[in-house]
Image: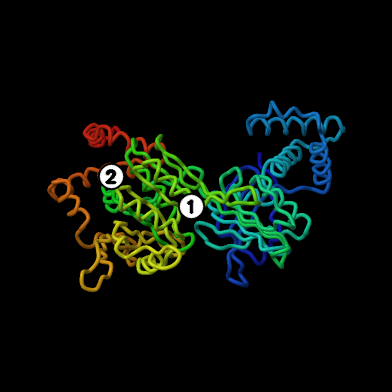
Amino acid sequence: MWFGLSVVGLDRERYVLVDFYPVKPPYAYAGIYMDKFEGRLKYIAIEPVLRDVDRRVLKIVERLLLEDRSIDLKVLLEKKDVEDFLKRRVDWILKKRRIRLEDEAVEKIKYYVLRDLLGYGRVDVLIRDPDIEDISCDGVGVPVYVWHRRYESLATNIVFEDVEELNSFIIKLAYRAGKQISVASPIVEGSIPEGYRIHLTLKEVSRRGGTFTIRKFSEVPYTVIDLIGFGTFSIELAAYLWYLIDAKKSLMIGGATAAGKTTALNSLAVFIRPEAKIVTIEETPELRLPHENWIPLVARPGRGEWIENITLFDLLKSALRMRPDYIIVGEVRGEEAYTLFQSIATGHAGMCTIHAENVDYAIKRLETEPMNIPRLLIPMMNVYIQMERVKIGEKIARRAIDTYEIVGLNPETEEVILNRVFRWNPTIDKIEHEGESELLKQIARTKFLSMKDIYAEIENRRRIIEYLLEKGMSSFHEVSRVIRDYYGNPDEVLYRVEAGAL
C-alpha cells in the first residue's frame, strides 16, 4: 500500500531532489534536497499526509489511549505485543466512537499513534534512519540538524515552534533515559533504551530555549570487512593489525569528532582471541563484542548527595583487580590514561581512542594535564592509527590515513620514535604499505620465530579477510565466527577458504 507523503516546509521551485531512500516503508522516507538559491543540502523527513479530519481523529485516539486505565501492562512484555495491542485498540476506539474512515486513513493514524506513543514523535524518522549519526535541536524556532554519514551536517524540515512542545519532548527523552530534568537540575546526560547518548538542557541554561542532542551508533556494529568495503582499511592493514592484536600488542586510535574512532576500535577488538578475558570501560555503552568472557563497565555520574560518582578512573582501577587479558577504554581524556599505560607496562594489553588531529598532537595530549603520561611510558602503546573524515569526489568517507608503530625513545633527544607502516594515498584513494615493521621484528626476536614464518601467518589471515570480502560475508556474526574458528583450527579454516566452502 502506498500512502500520500507529506513534505513539510519544502518549496518545490527552490529545492531539487538529490537522494531519496526508505526509512520505514511504506510510511516514512528520507529525502536529500539541494537548495538552488543557497547551494546547500537539506534533509527532509517524509511521512504520510494527514487531512484535517485525520488530525482530529488522531488527537481523540491518542487522548483516549493515554487516559485508559484498564490496560493490563503485565501482558505487554515485548515491543511487538505493545504495537499489536495499540493497533487493536485504535480499531476498538474507532468502532466504539462510530468513526468511519478509509482503510488508508486508519493505517496512517496507527502509524502516528505508534510513532508518538512508542517512538520519538516528530524526530522518529531521524532516530530510525541508519545513515544519521547525530541529531541536535538548538532551541525553539530553529531547524533540527543532523549529521549524515554521506552528506555531513544538514538542516531538516523539523522545527519545534512551541516552547511547551519542545520542553515536553525533552522531559520525555530524560524519562526514557531514567533521569529527571527540572529547573533545579537543567542539564542531563544519559542513554535512551536504544543505547544512544543524549544531552539535554532547559532554557535556564540555554538562551534560545531547551536543547537536545542525540548521538547515535549502530546497534549491530560494523565489522572490519565492512570497513574494508568502505575503504576505511585495506586488506593488508587489517591482516597486519589482526596479527599484532593476537600478539597482545596495544593500540590507540586517534582522530577528530565523528572520524570513526569507536567504530574502528570495535571492529578491531573482534580480532581478540575468543577465550581472552576483556574489560571495556566507557562513559556511554557503545562497544559490542562477541566474546563470552567480556565485562562491559560504564561510568556513572553522581547526582545528589547520596549517589557516588563513578568515573572512568574508578572503573579502570577496579578492572585491574579482575586480571583481564585486554583492557579497552572507549576514550582516554583524563587521569585514567595514566592508569591504562601503567597497566600495559605490567603486562595487560590495552586498546583505546583519543581525540587528536594527528599523532604529534596525541603525544602532546598524553604528556600534559590531565593525563600526565611520562614520556618513558608512551612506547608502551605499540600502534597508533590516525582516522580522518575525507572527501572522495562528492562523498564524505572515513580513512585510516596513517598507521604508526611507536618504536621507543631516541637516546640522544628523548623524542618518541615513530615508524609509519601504512599511509593513505589520496591521489588514488588507497592505503599503501610504507616501510618495514619494527614490531614484527621484535615479535620474531621474543618468540624465536623467523620473519618468513610471521609473514606467512599474516598472509594466511590476509587470505581469510580477502575471502570474506569477496563472498560478502561482512555480518558481525559471520566475521566473529570465522575468527573464532581460525583460532580453534587454522588449517581447517584455510582449507575451506581454498575450497570456497567457508
In percent of width and height, residue 211 lies at: 67, 60
Q: Quick one: label 1 or label 2, which is nearer the N terminus?
A: 2
Amino acid tagged 1 = Leu
Indicate the position of residue 347 as horizontal and vertical percent values. Answer: 29, 48
| Circle 1 SS class | helix
Q: Residue furthest right?
A: 97
Q: State the quadrant of the N terminus.
A: top right
Q: Nearer the viewer, mark 1 or mark 2?
A: 1
Residue at the image point whose x is 73% and y is 63% from the top? 204
Q: Which residue is mark 2?
A: 246
Instruction: Determine if residue 260 is in view.
Output: no
Q: Assess disc 1: are there few (<14), some (14-19) or many (≥20) residues with their C-alpha within 10 Å of its C-alpha.
A: many
Is 374 displayed left or right of 305 in the figure?
left
Q: How is the image coloured?
A: rainbow
Disc 2, SS = helix
**Structural crowding at the residue carrying mark 2, measured as other residues with C-alpha within 10 Å and reported as few (<14), some (14–19) or many (≥20):** few
Q: Which residue is mark 1?
A: 312
Find residue 379 and name its label.
none
Left or right, 267 with reference to 131: left
Q: Amino acid at mark 2?
A: Asp
Q: Is residue 134 above or below residue 63?
A: below
Residue 193 in the image: x percent, y percent? 60, 43
| Residue at 36% in and 59% down | 400
Percent position of residue 496, x then y: 25, 33
Quadrant for the C terminus in the image: top left
**Among all residues in the image, which is located at the extreme front?**
305
Q: CA distance from mark 1 to mark 2?
A: 26 Å
